[in-house]
Amino acid sequence: AQSVTQPDIHITVSEGASLELRCNYSYGATPYLFWYVQSPGQGLQLLLKYFSGDTLVQGIKGFEAEFKRSQSSFNLRKPSVHWSDAAEYFCAVGGMDSSYKLIFGSGTRLLVRP
Amino acid sequence: GAGVSQSPSNKVTEKGKDVELRCDPISGHTALYWYRQSLGQGLEFLIYFQGNSAPDKSGLPSDRFSAERTGGSVSTLTIQRTQQEDSAVYLCASSLGVGELFFGEGSRLTVL
């Protein structure tokens, strides 16, 4: 079955600290993986995506994510968090086997301490 | 249009009434999705249209929910006999099949 787990509901980090948001997926074939961000009062925006090739992908706003097939994970990272990164982050999985239907995780809310 | 357009942006209705939510996707996008986002919850998949294929309705929570997509473009999500637990933000997204989803601003539904 196609599913995504984001085990952390909330994460609080200090501005300037590093960040890692966890995402584990279940998918029978080669997954397409995505991270989206939803800032307060705004719509969802794509941060980055993985289809194939290099397992470390770079996205916008200084974010990156690493696909680890052996761990069924696609964790999102940022070396130095800015106050404007406070938002909700969603991981999503899809692929050819499911006609590219995207299923999202329940999200992780990031709070940034000044 | 320039982006995904949803209407109404806000809808307040009484329990038991029917509501229709509209989504106008980006021109040329073959895939259209409906998701539901309840307060403090993630994005719950509802239904997925891809080209001329039969829609994937596996996420619809009950037979009170239905959706159609006319002419491969505009989509309407209908909720019959609304219940208070239907209160949520209903998000529509479109894409070119594989790749980035473009989301609308959502329709906030409140059932009294």
Image (cartoon, rainbow, N blue to C red):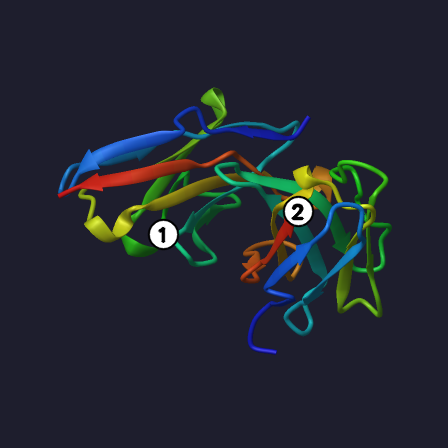
- For disc 2, the marked residue is B112
Q: Residues within 10 Å of mark 2 (few under 14, many from 20)?
A: few
The chain containing the residue under callout 2 comes to B
Which quarter of the figure has residue A18? top left
Quarter of the N terminus of chain A within the rendering: top right
Q: Residues within 10 Å of mark 1 (few under 14, many from 20)?
A: some
The answer to which of A19 and B68 lies nearer the viewer is: B68
Q: Position of residue A24 (x, y in %)?
A: 48, 26
Mark 2–mark 1 CB contact (< 8 Å): no
The residue positioned 60% from the left and 67% from the top of the image is: B4
Which quarter of the figure has residue B45? top right
Q: Position of residue A74 (x, y in %)?
A: 43, 33
Q: Is residue A109 left or right of B10 when viewed as pictured?
A: left
Q: Position of residue B104 (x, y in %)?
A: 57, 62
The chain containing the residue under callout 1 comes to A
The answer to which of A67 and B103 lies nearer the viewer is: B103
Q: CA distance from mark 2 to mark 1?
A: 41 Å
* Mark 2 vs mark 1: in front: 2
Under circle 2, the secondary element is loop
- Say what amino acid the circle numbered 2 marks: Leu
The answer to which of B66 and A97 lies nearer the viewer is: B66
- For disc 1, the marked residue is A59
Residue A78 seen in the figure: no
The answer to which of B5 and B53 lies nearer the viewer is: B5
Quarter of the C terminus of chain A within the rendering: top left
- Say what amino acid the circle numbered 1 marks: Gly
The residue positioned 86% from the left and 39% from the top of the image is: B63
Under circle 1, the secondary element is loop
Residue B81 seen in the figure: yes
Farthest top residue in view: A71
Q: Position of residue B80 (x, y in %)?
A: 83, 48
Q: Is residue B95 left or right of B64 when viewed as pictured?
A: left
